[in-house]
Image: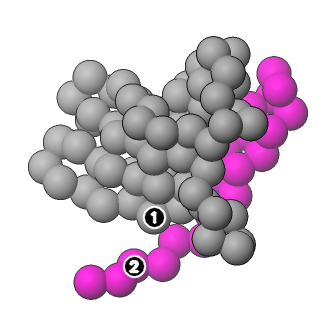
Amino acid sequence: MVLKSEDETVKGCLFNEFGITALDFTYDRRKEKVKLHSVMKMMDRWYIRRVLRHDLREVLKRLEQGDTIYENTRYKITYKFTPTIYN
């Protein structure tokens, strides 16, 4: 995942190790809302988009606090991140 912070918004792109983009999104810190802009076809279902929005919101809140792991216990999905900062 690549994130770019601009004032109260965070723009992000989630992709796999081959460089294939899974989704593009923005996160509004004030409203704590995630908006999905494009989602790869096999994940573009309303029920998957709902889980993705919720999980991305929680992941981004935790990343701001310094946590690098988030687990969605309901769906048994674990997200692990290794932060790398580039200027």
Q: Which residue is mark 2?
A: 85
Residues in magenta, as a range: 67-87
Q: Main secondary structure of the magenta part?
A: loop
Most extreme residue toward the bottom is: 87
74 vs 21: above or below: above
Amino acid of disc 2: Ile
Residue 80 visible: yes
Residue visible at 53% across and 61% down?
A: 1
Q: Please name the residue that numbered disc 1 is placed on.
A: 2
5 relative position to 58: left or right: left
Whole-percent x, y for residue 47 in the image: 69, 16
**The stretch drawn in magenta includes residue 47:** no
Q: Foreground: 35 or 30?
A: 35
Taking the image as shown, residue 83 lies to the left or right of residue 64, namely right
Residue 82 drawn in magenta:
yes
Of 86 and 61, the residue lying toward us: 86
